[in-house]
Structure formats: structure tokens, C-alpha cells
Amino acid sequence: MVRGDSLALNSPTFWQPGVFHSERLVNMSHHNYRQEPNVRFSPDKSLVLFTSNMFGPSYVFGAEVAKADNPPAGDVQSTPELARRFNPVDPPAAGA
């Protein structure tokens, strides 16, 4: 039963659930999943930090959470392009 007073579920003082919308920050298609990415946030919540071996050896990566406003044309490169440039070996097939 929904009450009509200040303790009601639809009261502005009652905690209201939100909706989570995910957004892909990095294409992990060249990541070899024998290693866990171990995602963490930076202390100021501006970066998502993770490990990956998509370029061969394991590295720590940081992806900015904020969207870029009109990035310069040469600044944006796709993760698969970078992976092919630094580790020209295709990722193993799924389940291999």
C-alpha cells in the first residue's frame, strides 16, 4: 500500500533509484583473456585504470571517463589499430 504522507515511497525525501547507462571506453577485442583486466578507478574518479596484454606484454592503461569535446583529428586512434601496430598477432579465437 502506498502511503500519502512524508514516509511514502514516492516522497521526495525517500531514496530514488537511478538508471545506469554503460559506455564502452576501450575496445578489448585484442586482449588475451588469460589475464584479468582488474578495473579500478583513480582516486579522483577521472580515469578507469586496467591491465591488458593486447599489445603483447602486460601494461597498465588509463581511459578518461569524461568525453572529449572535438578532439584533434590525429589524436583519436582505435584500440584494434594500436594493437595491430604494436602487436601484429591476431587475438586467439574464442574458446581457444
Image (spheres, grey):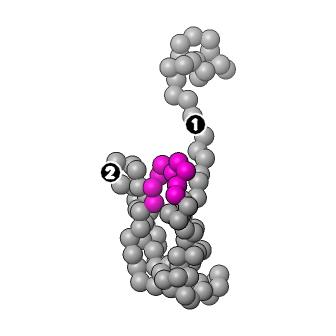
Image height of 75 relative to 82, above or below: above
Image height of 84 relative to 47, above or below: below
x and y, in percent, of residue 85 in the image: 52, 82
Q: Is residue 66 magenta?
A: yes
At x 65%, y 81%, the residue is 94
Q: Which residue is mark 1?
A: 18
Q: Nearer the viewer, mark 1 or mark 2?
A: 2
Amino acid type of the residue that numbered disc 2 sits on in the rendered structure: Pro
Main secondary structure along the magenta-highlighted residues: loop
Q: Which residue is mark 2?
A: 43
Q: Is residue 39 magenta?
A: no
The quarter of the rendered structure image containing the C terminus is bottom right
Image height of 77 relative to 90, above or below: above
Residue range highlighted in magenta: 63-72
The quarter of the rendered structure image containing the N terminus is top right
Question: Crowdedness of circle 1 by 10 Å Cα count: few (<14), some, many (20+)?
Answer: few
Describe the element under mark 1 as helix, strand or loop.
loop
Q: How many labels, in total? A: 2
Left or right, residue 49 beside residue 88: left
At x 59%, y 22%, the residue is 9
Amino acid type of the residue that numbered disc 1 sits on in the rendered structure: Gly
Left or right, residue 37 beside residue 84: left
Describe the element under mark 2 as helix, strand or loop.
loop
Q: Which mark is residue 37?
A: none
Q: Which circle's residue, 1 or 2, is located before the other in the chain?
A: 1
- 3D distance between C-alphas at marks 1 and 2: 23 Å
Would residue 15 be seen by someone viewing this image from the given angle? yes
